[in-house]
Amino acid sequence: MATTYLYKTPSSTGSNTISTFSGWIKKTANGAYQGIFTSVYEAGEYFQINFESGNDSLEVRAKVSSSYVLRKITTRRFRDNAAFYHIVVAIDTTDATAEDRCKIYVNGVRETSFSTNTNPSQNQDLKMNTAGSYQQRIGRSESSSYFGGLMAHVHWVDGTAYQASTFGETDSTSGIWKPKTNPTVTYGTNGFFLKFENSGNLDLDSSGNNLSFTTSGTLTQNVDTPTNNFAIFNRLTRHGQNTNNNGDLLEDGNTVFDTPSGTNSMKGLVISTLGMESGKYYCEIKVKAGTRLGVGICNMNVFNTTSVPYDTTNQSMILYTPNDGNVKYDGDSTYASGVSATTDDILGFALDMDNNHWYIHKNGTYFNSGNPASGSTGTGSIIGNITNGTNYFNHGAMFFFASDFSTSGYARAEFNFGSGVFSTTAVSSAGTNASNIGIFEYDVPTGYSALSTKGLNE
C-alpha cells in the first residue's frame, strides 16, 4: 500500500464498546511503525491496530483524553514477509473478565504473551464507531504511518465480538489456516467487508451496508492472496557482501529491486521468497535502468560465496546482465548471449526444474530460438551454453534473484512473479496462460506456471 490508504467517515454512531477487526495481511516492510486499522475520534482520542517500529510487534491501543485506556503489545515479532498473517482483534469492554476485553488472534491462535498489557476498564468507551468528521482508516495510523504490504478480506464489525474461527478455518488436507470467503457475520451500523481481490472496484463494501470509501493514493489490484500466495523478494535474506539494510533495495511490495546511484558500495543481492525443486516456472522482469543490474537463478550456496556474483567453488549462481547481454557463471566465466536489454524491455524467465534447463526471452523472443516446451532436449536452453551447467541444479532448491554486481552506477528492475503488475503498473495486454495461475505480459510456455503456492502444487 505504500502511502495509499482508504478512509470513510461514519454517518451514524454505532457501538463504542464492542467491535471486531479481521484481515489477512502480507507484511513487506519491517522495522517501521505501520498502521493497519485506525478509528480516529479527535486529537488524542482513537482506537488503532498497528505494527510497532523497531521490534515489529503487533499492537492494539486506544487513547481517550490523550491517555492510554487500552494497550497490548505482543512479545511475538512479525517479520515474515513471505506469507499472509490472519489477524483478528475482538473488542468487548463490557466483559466482566479484564483479559477478555481485547482478544488478539493470529492464524487462528489467541495471543497470550505481551510486553505491555493494559486492559480497558469495564464498559470503557473506545471511540470506535462515532459519527462525525473523523475517519476510519485502513492502511494508515492516527498520524501518517502507512502499512507496507498487501491486504485481503478485511472485515470491520460494529457491535459483535467474534472469534477467529468466524473468519478462518483449518484446511482438512494441508492443515493450513485459510480464509472463509463468505463468513456468517452481522456487521452492524458501521461494519464493512473489503475483499481487495479479483474486482475492478477494489474499495467495494461487500458487507451489505454498501459503505462508501475514499482512496488516498493509488490502490493496485493484486492476485496475490491468502489462498494463492505469490513469490516476492525476501527481505530477510541478503548476501553478506551487502552491508546496507535490505530496505534500501526493495520497493512496491518487495517486487522492485533498486540500488540508487548514490549507494555505490552496495553490491546487494535478494532472492525470491519461494524456491523451486521440481516443476516448471515462469516470471517476468521489466528492465528500468542501470549498468550494474544482474538477474538470474541461484541456489542457497550463493550465501557461502565471498563476492557477488563470483562463485568459483560453489556453483551457486547464473547471472544475466542486461546491459551487455552476457551470462556469467563459475566465477567470471562468460557466455555472450548476443542479446542485451534496455529500459522497459521485458525479460521472461522460464525455469524447467524437471529437466534442468533455463530459457530467457526478450519481449517475447527467446534467446537461441529457445523452446521451453522441449523437455529433456533443452532446445536453446541457457544451460546448454554453460560448462557443467546442470551441476547448478545439484544443490537443492533454485531461486530467482536480482543483484547489483558492481560499485559504480546503479540498478533497477521491476519483477512480475504473476501478480500482473510491474511496480504499480498493470501489464498492458496479458498473454495466454494454460495454468490460469498468474497474469503476465507474454504467453506463459506450455507446462509452466507462476511461482506461487498453487503453482508449486501443479
Image (cartoon, helix red, strand yellow):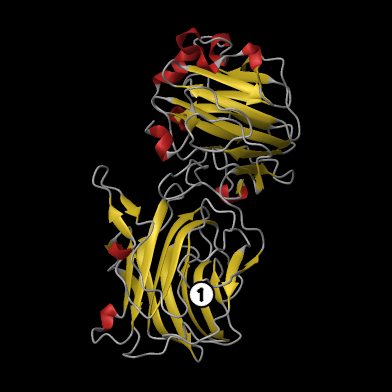
Residue 325, quarter of the rendered image: top right
Q: Position of residue 343 (x, y in %)?
A: 76, 34
Amino acid carrying mark 1 in the image: Thr
Report the label total.
1
Q: Position of residue 383 (x, y in %)?
A: 54, 14
Residue at coordinates 44% horizontally, 30% vertically from top-left? 300
432 and 362: which one is in front? 432
Image vertical order of residue 383 relative to residue 283, above or below = above
Q: Label 1 neighbourhood size at 10 Å, few (<14), some (14-19), many (20+)?
A: many
Residue 321, quarter of the rendered image: top right
Residue at coordinates 37% horizontally, 90% vertically from top-left? 124
316 and 164: which one is in front? 164
Whether residue 424 is visible to the viewer of this picture, yes or no, is: yes
Whether residue 305 is visible to the viewer of this picture, yes or no, is: no
Q: Position of residue 101 (x, y in %)?
A: 31, 81
Quadrant where the N terminus lies?
bottom right
Q: Position of residue 398 (x, y in %)?
A: 45, 28
Image vertical order of residue 164 relative to residue 313, above or below = below
In the picture, measured across the screen, residue 75 lies left or right of residue 14, that is left
To which residue does mark 1 refer?
Answer: 38
Image vertical order of residue 418 relative to residue 190, above or below = above
Quadrant where the C terminus lies?
top left
Helix, strand or loop at mark 1 = strand
In the picture, measured across the screen, residue 341 lies left or right of residue 256, that is right
229 and 277: which one is in front? 229
Residue at coordinates 37% horizontally, 33% vertically from top-left? 457
